[in-house]
Image: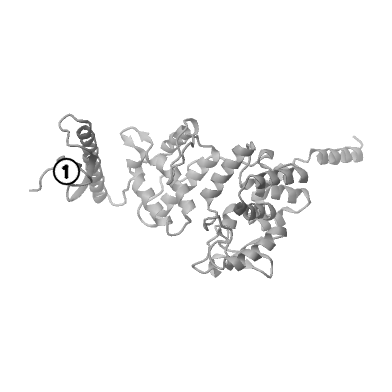
């Protein structure tokens, strides 16, 4: 009969400390002097031992439930499996963004334990609504692989809430497809509304203001950021698109990047989320076109736009950089997407039709109308049309 797990002091391991062995698995409880029965190291070891025993017993009970009820899995198990899956299909930045939203969800306290310990089948829409309300009202420290000193706890806005919902729904749908779950318990859940960017997200309302803001941003940015930021300004592209661009994506004949659609894309090429059924084309002009030609010759493989350490501009890197720029320049609405919003608004002001703009931006016309056309707010033009109409009708 196997011995029951107990706390043991091993003086020769890691300079001395308390350990235990449970079913062949060794656990480190606390390192330090042998100060039992009342010393701080031993008390810490006791607390850790109790937590391990309770946790393992809970895991074994859940495993037995899954054996008796095939298709049952906990929230944590499904999300962990999904994260492991997307490490092979998504960029490291995307994986970290998903991780940052999943960790507080699985660790959210509920009656009887943590949300992550619940069976997915028992998860309700109200559980998610309560979690999002807590994240919206109570500042939390962000979960990051690399701890950043001085970063203050923050709440979740609508953008973070929508990002979480998209991620968790994708995870559960993936689990259903893979027969890990019989159904998605969050199907039909009400998602947080999307927020259209207003004038606060623009670099300026006219050419002079835009150029001045752009110059300020460049003036406080290191030189290796300049080509990337200039490309944001001149293309209206998403930051992630530029960060993923390689020499193989550059088509010199058209002077732009071409991310191939799914059916014609090689397996080693960037899988653009909006290039399922048609190519995503990003036209390059001005300084950016000349710079990209130089970068293609300089970097035949790997990302074209690179930091001084040779790494590319991933999502997390870009977001963090613009947070710092926003604070340093006292520009509250500034994000990397401010360039895209500004570019779209200026194109609409210049008279470009919505369908053409949608094609250039890699969006649908409906998305352009929802998120960009309202930024024009041409009140004077509306008044002139109204006065012409009322004058012609004799009112």
Residue 294 image position (x, y, % from top left): 64, 65
**Mark 1 = which residue?**
11
Which residue is painted at 39% across and 48% down in the image?
A: 79
| Of residues 191 and 158, the one drawn nearer to the viewer in this rendering | 158
Q: Is residue 79 above or below residue 140?
A: below
Q: Answer whether residue 370 is visible to the viewer in this image.
A: no
Residue 355 image position (x, y, % from top left): 71, 56
| Of residues 326 and 166, the one drawn nearer to the viewer in this rendering | 326
Q: Is residue 243 left or right of residue 125?
A: right
| Of residues 12 and 394, the one drawn nearer to the viewer in this rendering | 12
Which residue is painted at 48% across and 36% down in the image?
A: 150
Which residue is painted at 65% across and 41% down in the image?
A: 201
The quarter holding residue 174 reads bottom left
Q: Answer whether residue 106 is visible to the viewer in this image.
A: yes
Residue 269 image position (x, y, % from top left): 52, 65
Q: SS of the residue at dot 1?
A: loop
Residue 23 image position (x, y, % from top left): 17, 49
């Amino acid at each position: 009969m196997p011995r029951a797990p107990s706390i043991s002091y091993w003086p020769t391991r890691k300079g001395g400390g308390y350990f235990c062995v449970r079913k062949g698995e060794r656990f480190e409880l606390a390192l330090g002097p042998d100060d039992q029965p009342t010393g701080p190291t031993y008390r810490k070891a006791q607390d850790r031992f109790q937590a391990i025993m309770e946790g393992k017993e809970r895991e074994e009970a859940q495993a037995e439930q899954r054996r008796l009820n095939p298709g049952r899995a906990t929230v944590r198990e499904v999300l962990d499996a999904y994260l492991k899956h997307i490490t092979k299909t998504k960029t490291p930045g995307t994986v970290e963004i998903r991780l940052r939203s999943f960790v507080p969800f699985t660790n959210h306290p509920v009656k009887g334990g943590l949300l992550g310990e619940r069976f997915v089948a028992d998860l309700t829409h109200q559980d998610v609504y309560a979690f999002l309300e807590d994240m919206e009202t109570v500042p939390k420290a962000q979960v990051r692989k690399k701890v950043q000193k001085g970063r203050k706890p923050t709440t979740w806005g609508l953008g973070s809430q929508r990002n979480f919902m998209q991620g968790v729904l994708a995870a559960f749908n993936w689990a259903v497809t893979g027969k890990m779950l019989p159904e998605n318990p969050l199907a039909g859940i009400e998602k947080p509304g999307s927020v259209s960017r207003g004038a606060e997200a623009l670099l300026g309302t006219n050419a002079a203001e835009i150029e001045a803001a752009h110059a300020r941003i460049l003036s406080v940015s290191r030189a290796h950021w300049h080509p990337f930021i200039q490309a944001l300004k001149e293309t209206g592209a998403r930051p992630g698109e530029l960060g993923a661009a390689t020499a193989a994506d550059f088509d010199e004949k058209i002077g732009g990047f071409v991310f191939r659609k799914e059916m014609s894309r090689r397996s080693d090429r960037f899988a653009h989320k909006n290039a399922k059924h048609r190519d995503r084309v990003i036209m390059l002009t001005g300084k950016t076109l000349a710079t990209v030609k130089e970068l293609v010759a300089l970097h035949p493989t790997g990302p074209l736009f690179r930091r001084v350490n040779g790494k590319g501009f991933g999502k997390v890197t870009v977001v963090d950089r613009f947070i710092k720029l926003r604070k340093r320049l006292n520009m509250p609405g500034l994000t990397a997407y401010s360039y895209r919003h500004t570019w779209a608004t200026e194109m609409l002001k210049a008279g470009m039709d919505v369908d053409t703009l949608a094609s250039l931006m890699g969006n649908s016309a409906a998305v352009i109308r929802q998120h960009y056309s309202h930024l024009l707010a041409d009140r004077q033009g509306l008044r002139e049309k109204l006065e012409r109409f009322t004058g012609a009708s004799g009112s």
